[in-house]
Amino acid sequence: MRMEPGNTTTFELRYRGALETYLEPGADETQLIAALELGKIALADEVSLLDLLAIHHVSLESLIRGSRRNADVQPLLAKAIEFLAQVAAPFEMAQRGWRDIVGQLRLANEALEERVAERTAALQASELERYLMKAERLSGLGSLVAGVAHELSTPIGNCLTVSTSLMRRSSALKCRSGDRPVAPFKAFCLRRRQS
C-alpha cells in the first residue's frame, strides 16, 4: 500500500487513534497489544516500513502540537517509542523469518548443487565405463575377425594358386593333345607325382 501525500487512509486514522489512546495518562498494556495488532494489519496490507514510520511521525507531531503547551514532551516521546516498537514488531518478526527462510534456501541450494555434482560425476563415470567396455568388446571382435580372416586367407590363397596352375596346365594339355588324349594326360599326372 503506497501512501499518497495529503491522502489520509483508514489505517492512518486507526494508527493515530491508537497512539493517542496509548499516550493518555493511565494507558496500560492493552493499548500496546492494540499496537501489535496494528503492526500485523500493516504487514498484511503491505504498508511499507517507511510508510509506517511516516505515519507515526505525522501522528506524533500532530498529537504533540495538540497537547498542552506547557506539558513535558519527553514522557510522551518515550511512550511513543514503546508504541512504535510494538507496531514494528511484526515487521521485525517477518524480517527474521525471511532471513531464516533465505538461509534454509541457501543451504538447500548448496545441498542440491552438491547432489547434482555427485550425480553428474557418477553419470560421467558410468558413461566412461560403458564406452571403455564397448571399446574393449570392439577390440576383441576386431582381433577375432583378423584371426579368422588370416586363417581363411591362407588356405583360400593356396587353393587359388593351385587352381590357377591347374587351369594353365589343363589348357596346355588340350592344346598339345591333338589326337592322343591319353598320353599327354599320363605325362601330366606323372609330373604331378614327382613334384
Image (cartoon, rainbow, N blue to C red):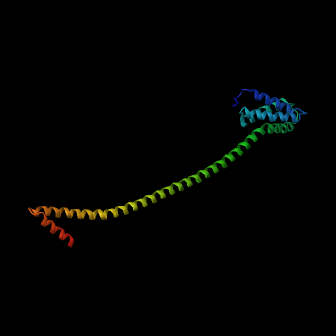
**At which x and y percent is residue 90?**
77, 38
Q: Name the image quarter holding the N terminus.
A: top right
Most distant residue in the left direction: 179
In depth, the one of 195 and 130 nearer the eye is 195
Q: Is residue 148 visible?
A: yes
Q: Quadrant of residue 56?
A: top right
Most distant residue in the bottom direction: 194
In depth, the one of 109 and 128 nearer the eye is 128
Q: Residue at x 76, y 41 (%)?
A: 93
From the viewer's perspective, is residue 1 above or below residue 123? above
From the viewer's perspective, is residue 135 above or below residue 48? below
Q: Quadrant of residue 36?
A: top right
**At which x and y percent is residue 174?**
13, 61
Q: Name the image quarter holding the C terminus.
A: bottom left
Q: Is residue 195 visible?
A: no
Q: Residue at x 41, y 59 (%)?
A: 141
**At which x and y percent is residue 124?**
53, 54
Q: Residue at x 78, y 39 (%)?
A: 89
